[in-house]
Image (tube, rainbow, N blue to C red):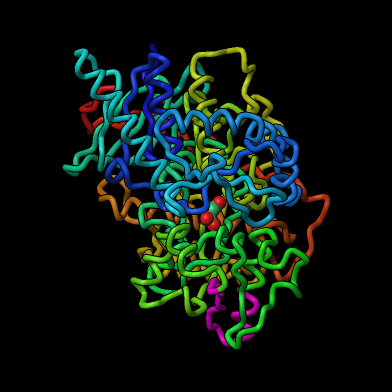
């Protein structure tokens, strides 16, 4: 029996917890907020899978590769699209009630998909439906274990990952647990044979985001500090259409899939002049098209005209967006609504192989925290829930199976592609940061939005790197949740800016004004890892905290 610590309770974490419990492992699930609080809950459009007779795995693969702009890992994409349908059927078994009509499960079309293949639930409440079903499944497993007198799965809410514990395993580093901050403010260590990170993305890096405030990249930051390789961190996806009101709620791609169009502030369509697929062009192209149009009209948001869809369809198919419009005093059945791009999804993250294994033994990463290579430089719409389901399942299968072969990262040549400059400027423990100004989260978000947002330039990124180098975070030893989060955002902001500076081309979601074209010789991922000399600082188990949580 393996002791498994799962960190995070979105789709990826919940699937990992259920699968690991069912496989007979002893599971501890910790999550920073309440069990049902996660980025998954906000997903609208749905989950893409080649499940219908007019579709094929190959067509889904092709669409994913095209959107990924030359940076996808072809093997990861194949796994995603081949295993996706089975994982969607698992979700149905776990109680997810996808929308149906008289012909069966209904499906939507989203940008850059050559077929309608996006399943949805509750209209545009797909993520909420998935989260609800999986939370119930996990709770049922915990209840059953408890009734049988066992503790095969225990759940700790409002418990934050502070750092990973790395120990020396005969000369090589191994993750053996985590340091956690509990709801009472106490720190605890938990030992585990395997830690599965499922902590999600880091939309809170940016001033405008569709993510909830809890999306502060805690898992990527902790993995980076522990010495795990990260990859492609410069690729952050900006959703083209967030409602341009406080909180920037998402307005799903599916709305454009149903026929809504984008208009300038004076009411003209502008996307047909930018791309033959107009409003259904890949997400990065639509986001940049909107950002450019906003600049041309003095910063005012563009308009999304969904009036042609009719009130009945808007209210039944998109109840979440209808409610968000209503809360903002807008009636989208009768008037176009203001929309603008917002940070949405991180393609980069902790580098994993096809089994969720990271470059550190004992550490797995699944869902948005991971960079599997399935999304390349630009994720295809509605592939994120699918990726979380597919690779969480595979990580659990990999826990005690050796037949998957050695991890990808045994090939150290891959990580040898490290860029020394990236490492130096991004390192949180570098002496140059010690006397800096205490970082302010709002100012950091503003800086990232301006310098490392939809449009980037070498000069803007260089200025941002200098500013970031002059900031410091609160000492992690005594920090509370908000301070730890801000420290994580600072570490990640440095990483993203450094990686964006290092990638001297435009590709997918990464667009540099000074290098406006893709450079074929740069069509490869960018792996980075902290130098071993610095990760040694984490090689000891902290002595103060007690082992109060059993795993
Ligand atoms: C959306 O509904 O537009 C979001 C779907 C996604 O991010 O894949």
- Please tell me in which quadrant of the rendered image residue 473 appears: bottom left
Work out which quarter of the rendered image holds the C terminus and state it. Answer: top left
- Please tell me in which quadrant of the rendered image residue 302 appears: bottom right
Q: For this rendering, which residue is in front, 535 or 317?
A: 317
Q: Residue at x 25, y 34 (%)?
A: 156
Work out which quarter of the rendered image holds the N terminus and state it. Answer: top left
**Residue 196 percent coordinates (x, y):** 44, 30
- Please tell me in which quadrant of the rendered image residue 282 appears: bottom right
**Residue 461 percent coordinates (x, y):** 60, 66
Is 34 placed left or right of 78 in the picture?
left
Is 532 placed left or right of 161 in the picture?
right
Can you see residue 501?
A: no
Can you see residue 354?
A: yes
Please, is residue 500 above or below residue 12 in the view?
below
Please, is residue 44 above or below residue 196 in the view?
below
Farthest-out residue, left: 184
Is 451 placed left or right of 516 in the picture?
left
Please, is residue 219 above or below residue 303 in the view?
above
Q: Which residues are magenta?
A: 291-307
**Residue 408 percent coordinates (x, y):** 65, 27
Tally of numbered discs: 0
Q: For this rendering, which residue is in front, 287 or 475?
A: 287
Q: Residue at x 67, y 46 (%)?
A: 376
């Amino acid at each position: 029996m393996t002791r498994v610590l799962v960190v995070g309770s979105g789709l990826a974490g919940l699937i990992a917890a259920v699968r690991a419990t069912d496989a007979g492992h002893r599971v501890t699930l910790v999550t920073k907020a309440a069990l049902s609080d996660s980025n998954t809950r906000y997903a609208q459009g749905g989950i893409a899978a080649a499940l219908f007779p007019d579709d094929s795995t190959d067509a889904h693969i092709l669409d994913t590769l095209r959107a990924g702009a030359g940076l996808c890992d072809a093997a990861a994409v194949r796994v995603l699209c081949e295993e996706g349908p089975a994982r969607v059927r698992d979700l149905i078994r776990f109680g997810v009630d996808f929308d149906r009509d008289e012909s069966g499960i209904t499906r939507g079309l989203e940008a850059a998909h050559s077929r309608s293949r996006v399943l949805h639930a509750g209209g545009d409440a797909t993520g909420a439906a998935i989260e609800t079903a999986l939370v119930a499944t996990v709770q049922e497993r915990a209840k059953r274990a408890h009734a049988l007198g066992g503790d095969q799965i225990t759940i700790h809410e409002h418990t934050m990952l502070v750092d990973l514990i790395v120990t020396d395993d005969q000369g090589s580093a191994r993750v053996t647990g985590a340091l956690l901050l509990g709801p009472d403010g106490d720190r605890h260590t938990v030992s585990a044979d395997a830690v599965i990170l499922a902590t999600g993305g880091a939309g809170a890096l940016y001033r405008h985001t569709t993510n909830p405030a809890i999306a502060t990249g805690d898992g990527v930051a902790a993995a980076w500090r522990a010495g795990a390789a990260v990859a492609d961190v410069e690729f952050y996806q900006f959703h083209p259409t967030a409602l341009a009101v406080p909180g920037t709620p998402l307005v799903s791609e599916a709305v454009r899939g149903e026929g809504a169009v984008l208009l300038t502030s004076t009411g003209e369509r502008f996307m047909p002049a930018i791309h033959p697929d107009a409003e259904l062009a890949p997400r990065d192209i639509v986001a940049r098209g909107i950002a450019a149009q906003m600049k041309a009209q003095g910063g005012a948001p563009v308009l999304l005209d969904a009036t042609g869809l009719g009130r009945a369809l808007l209210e039944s198919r998109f109840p979440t967006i209808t409610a968000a419009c209503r809360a903002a005093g807008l009636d989208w059945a009768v008037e176009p609504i203001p929309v603008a791009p917002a940070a949405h999804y991180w393609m980069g993250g902790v580098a994993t192989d096809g089994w969720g294994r990271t470059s550190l033994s004992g550490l797995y990463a699944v869902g948005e925290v991971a960079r599997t290579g399935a999304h390349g430089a630009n994720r295809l719409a509605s592939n994120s829930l699918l990726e979380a389901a597919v690779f969480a399942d595979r990580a659990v299968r990999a826990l005690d199976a050796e037949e998957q072969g050695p991890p990808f990262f045994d090939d150290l040549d891959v990580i040898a592609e490290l860029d020394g400059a990236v490492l130096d400027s991004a390192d949180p423990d570098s002496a140059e940061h010690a006397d800096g100004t205490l970082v302010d989260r709002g100012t950091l978000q503003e800086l990232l939005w301006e310098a490392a947002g939809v449009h980037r330039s070498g000069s803007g990124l260089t200025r941002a790197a200098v500013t970031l180098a002059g900031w410091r975070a609160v000492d992690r030893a005594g920090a509370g949740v908000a301070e730890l989060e801000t420290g994580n955002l600072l570490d990640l902001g440095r990483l993203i800016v450094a990686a964006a500076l290092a990638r001297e081309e435009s590709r997918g979601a990464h667009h540099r004004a000074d290098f406006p074209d893709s450079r074929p010789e740069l069509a490869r991922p960018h792996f980075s890892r902290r130098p071993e000399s610095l990760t040694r600082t984490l090689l000891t188990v902290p002595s103060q905290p007690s082992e109060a949580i059993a795993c």
